[in-house]
Image (tube, grey):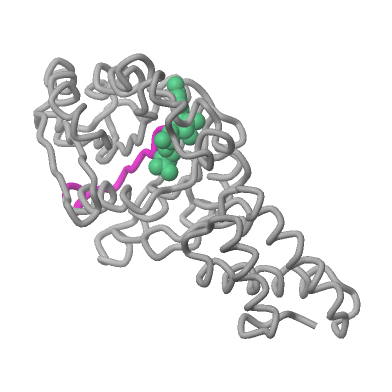
């Protein structure tokens, strides 16, 4: 029998999560109850087996209480209203990055070729394609690439329903030559934490997400700098590349985009607590 989210087990789960230091214990408990119900419904051969549901729940709560990120325990994250699958070690899409998608949707209203470079779960490309499709513009061709094979496998599942294609490799080396000069929107949420700041990240990121997803080199801009230098060769005339940076990195990122021959601008949002740098190739 599936364990409903309003189960009598709820107070106990909330108490265990609170004791482990989870700030949003109530909300997380509801999500874990629902996940356990889903897992036991799909696994148990005996639908009247409440013990199966209870042990599934216990395992999930234990993992969360031991500090595993909620999204890994659930196997998914909410991003721009989409339920995005998240595999262990693959970067969990952050709410603040929804601002990058908003900027891209604004810049790319007429876009037909989208590339999500450094794609992680593929959440950004999926969300942008969904948004442009919902706006009724035109059929969108979606491509996503990452250096981490686990990310590529995860992204492949998340973008399959948009007909998206995935590639594995180092930045632009991963992309098919046929995309050169054709990309209307290049999403690139490169890692941007300076190497020396990694030890100060919350344990959920530091101990559970792949190092390659976080480490942006000495000044946090090492990967972004390479994207800025090469993007103009891949963008279509008028095409735009977008990256997320910290406020402190913004001016240096703008300079890198300008040095890469792009018309560089920046957008910030207090609501999302996010900064995005855009580089447009001239027409
Ligand atoms: C900050 S995460 C962003 C993931 C995803 N775009 C998101 O916002 O949720 C950075 C991603 O860049 C990938 N990455 C790091 N270096 C790379 C490189 N040289 N080439 C391609 N991908 C890279 C990492 O594997 C990771 O998935």
Give residue 217's quadrant in the image: top left
Q: Residue 148 in the image: x percent, y percent?
A: 56, 29
Q: Residue 205 in the image: x percent, y percent?
A: 50, 38
Residue in the image at 30% along x and 17% along y: 219
Q: Nearer the viewer, residue 195 or 2?
A: 195
**Viewed as shown, does residue 36 lie left or right of 82?**
right
Quadrant of the displayed image that contains ligand 1: top left
**Viewed as shown, does residue 144 lie left or right of 16?**
left
| Quadrant location of the N terminus in the rendered image | bottom right
- Number of marks in picture: 0
Q: Residue 125 in the image: x percent, y percent?
A: 39, 47
Residue in the image at 56% along x and 49% along y: 69
- Asked if residue 45 lies in the magenta stretch, the reply is no
**Is residue 143 visible in the rendered structure shown here?**
no
| Quadrant location of the C terminus in the rendered image | top left
As drawn, 66 above or below 172: below
Q: Nearer the viewer, residue 9 or 217?
A: 9
Residue in the image at 39% along x and 65% along y: 81
Q: Nearer the viewer, residue 141 or 29?
A: 29
- For the magenta stretch, what is the residue range? 107-118
As drawn, 153 above or below 212: below
Residue in the image at 65% along x and 68% along y: 35
């Amino acid at each position: 029998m599936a364990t409903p989210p309003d189960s009598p087990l709820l107070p106990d789960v909330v108490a265990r999560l609170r004791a482990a230091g989870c700030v949003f214990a109530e909300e997380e408990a509801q999500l874990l109850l629902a996940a356990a119900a889903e897992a036991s419904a799909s696994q148990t051969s005996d639908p009247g087996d409440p013990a199966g549901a209870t042990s599934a729940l216990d395992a999930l709560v234990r993992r969360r209480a031991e500090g595993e990120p909620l999204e890994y325990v659930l196997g998914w994250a909410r991003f721009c209203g989409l339920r995005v699958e998240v595999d262990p070690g693959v970067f969990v899409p952050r709410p603040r990055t929804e601002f990058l998608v908003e900027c891209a949707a604004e810049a790319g209203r007429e876009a037909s070729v989208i590339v999500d470079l450094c794609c992680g779960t593929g959440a950004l490309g999926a969300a942008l394609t969904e948004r442009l499709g919902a706006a009724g513009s035109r059929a969108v061709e979606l491509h996503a690439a990452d250096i981490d094979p686990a990310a590529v496998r995860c992204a492949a599942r998340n973008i399959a329903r948009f007909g998206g294609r995935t590639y594995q490799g180092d930045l632009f080396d991963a992309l098919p030559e046929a995309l050169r000069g054709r990309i209307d929107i290049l999403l690139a949420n490169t890692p941007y934490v300076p190497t020396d700041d990694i030890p100060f990240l919350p344990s959920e990121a530091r101990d559970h997400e792949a190092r390659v997803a976080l480490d942006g080199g000495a000044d946090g801009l090492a990967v972004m700098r390479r994207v800025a230098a090469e993007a103009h060769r891949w963008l279509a005339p008028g095409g735009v590349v977008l990256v997320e940076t910290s406020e402190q990195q913004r001016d240096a990122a703008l300079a890198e985009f300008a040095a890469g021959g792009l018309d560089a601008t920046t957008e910030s949002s207090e609501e999302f607590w996010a900064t995005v740098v855009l580089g447009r190739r001239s027409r």
